[in-house]
Image (cartoon, helix red, strand yellow):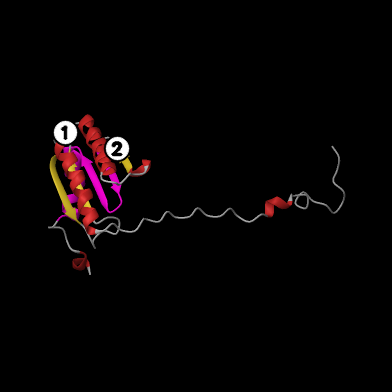
Amino acid sequence: MAKAPAGKTAAAKAPAAAKAPAAPRPTRRTRPPKVTPDRLAQLVEAARKSLEDDKAEDVLVLDVTGRADYADRLIIATGLVDRQIQAMATHVVEALELAGLPLRRDAVQASPDWVLIDALDLVIHLFKPEARALYGLERMWGPDSPSPEAGS
C-alpha cells in the first residue's frame, strides 16, 4: 500500500462535489382557490345523492365555513360493511367527476373502518358505525360543538 505524500491528508483528497450546496427543499403543494358557493352546493348535492343511492345511513352535511381552514363542508355517512363503504367511495368519486370535479389519485384515503375523500372544499367521511361513534366528528364540527370564539 502506497503512502500519501507528506502534507496531504485524506480530507484534502476529498472531491469538490462533497461541498456542493444542499438539494432544494420540495415545494409545498398549494390548495386551489376556493370554489364558489353555488359550485360547492352542486358538489355537495352530487355526493349526497350518490350516498343515498348506495343506502348510506345517517348522511349528515356540516357547514364548517370559518371554523376549519381545510374545507367549507363536511359530509359524514355510515356504511355497515367494508364492501358497502368501498362502493360508496367509488360511486362518490364518480359522481364528483360527472359534476366536473376529477379528483387526484391521492384524494381518497382508506383504513379498515373509515374512508376519507378530499374534494377541495368538501371533505367526505365514510365510516363503519363503531368508528363513527368513536371519532365523533359530529361532536367536534356539528352545530352543537363549541364555536371558535368560545375558546378565546
Residue at 20 percent of width and 48 percent of height: 75
Residue 87 visible? The answer is yes
Classify mark 1: helix, strand or loop.
Answer: loop
Note whether 119 is above or below 30 in the view shown.
above
Q: Of 135 and 73, which appears nearest the observer?
A: 73
* Relative image position of residue 74 (x, y in whole percent): 21, 51
Is residue 81 left or right of 15 when viewed as pictured?
Answer: left
Find residue 111 and name its label.
2
Task: Please give the range of residues in magenta.
Answer: 113-142
Q: Residues within 10 Å of mark 1 (few under 14, many from 20)?
A: some
Which residue has dot 1 on it? Answer: 80
Q: Amino acid at mark 1?
A: Leu
* Relative image position of residue 97 (x, y in whole percent): 29, 42
Sequence-first disc among 2 and 1: 1
Note whether 10 is above or below 84 in the view shown.
below
**Residue reaching furthest to the bottom:** 152
Q: Which image quadrant for residue 141?
A: bottom left
Residue 134 visible? The answer is no
- Magenta-span inclusion, residue 118: yes
**Residue reaching furthest to the top:** 83
Q: Amino acid at mark 2?
A: Ser
Q: Residues within 10 Å of mark 2 (few under 14, many from 20)?
A: few
Q: Of 134 and 112, which appears nearest the observer?
A: 112
Q: Of 144 and 125, which appears nearest the observer?
A: 125
Q: Quadrant of the C terminus?
A: bottom left
Note whether 85 is above or below 149 in the view shown.
above
- Magenta-span inclusion, residue 6: no
